[in-house]
Image (tube, grey):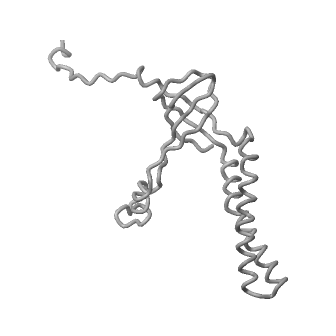
Amino acid sequence: MIKEWATVVSWHNGEAVVSCDVKASCNSCASRAGCGSRVLNKLGPQMTHTISVPSEQPLVAGQKVELGIAEGSLLSSALLVYMSPLVGLFVMAALFQTLFGYDLAAMGGAVLGGVGGFLLARAFSPKLAAREAWQPVILSVALPPDLLRVDATPVDANSQSR
């Protein structure tokens, strides 16, 4: 199970709208100063994803929840998105090369196969996303933000020793 913390935006009739921050992997390695990916991530927009998750427990805005999604569903969707255009590209390029015998025909077939694979993945993804196993679930719920209180007043050492 892949887990991520999210912040509740709203809750209504058993449906929670949560916001997840997009995290780059750049802050975890030791070569931060010379990393090109870190520079590119700073240039891009800082985004959050808002999704709707079923929740029987009432939640309040600002509350943290831990979301989970099965590894198999994530790997299957990545396989669909990345491999179908790639397979389409190679199959159609080989087919056009065999049928027409020209490199230009193979290149045209590769473009058609890649676009066709992308459209195929796009057509199948809503059907697969509707599966119950592919939906994120709430694993744990943190305390509401107004329930947790931290007392930061200093304790006098003389009054404590009595």
Image label count? 0
> Whole-percent x and y of residue 25?
47, 55
State whether residue 91 is above or below residue 162. below
Q: Foreground residue, 63 or 157? A: 63
In the rendered image, which quarter is residue 16 located in?
top right
| Residue found farthest to the left | 158
| Residue found farthest to the right | 99
State whether residue 151 is above or below residue 32. above
> Whole-percent x and y of residue 45?
44, 53
| Residue in view at x 56 percent, y 30 percent | 140
| Residue in view at x 67 percent, y 53 percent | 75
| Residue in view at x 78 percent, y 73 percent | 91
* Quarter containing the C terminus: top left
| Residue in view at x 59 percent, y 23 percent | 12
* Quarter containing the N terminus: top right
**Left or right relative to 93: residue 53:** left
**Left or right relative to 147: residue 102:** right
Q: Foreground residue, 27 or 47? A: 47
State whether residue 78 is above or below residue 116. above
> Whole-percent x and y of residue 145?
42, 25
> Whole-percent x and y of residue 18?
54, 35
In the rendered image, which quarter is residue 100 located in?
bottom right
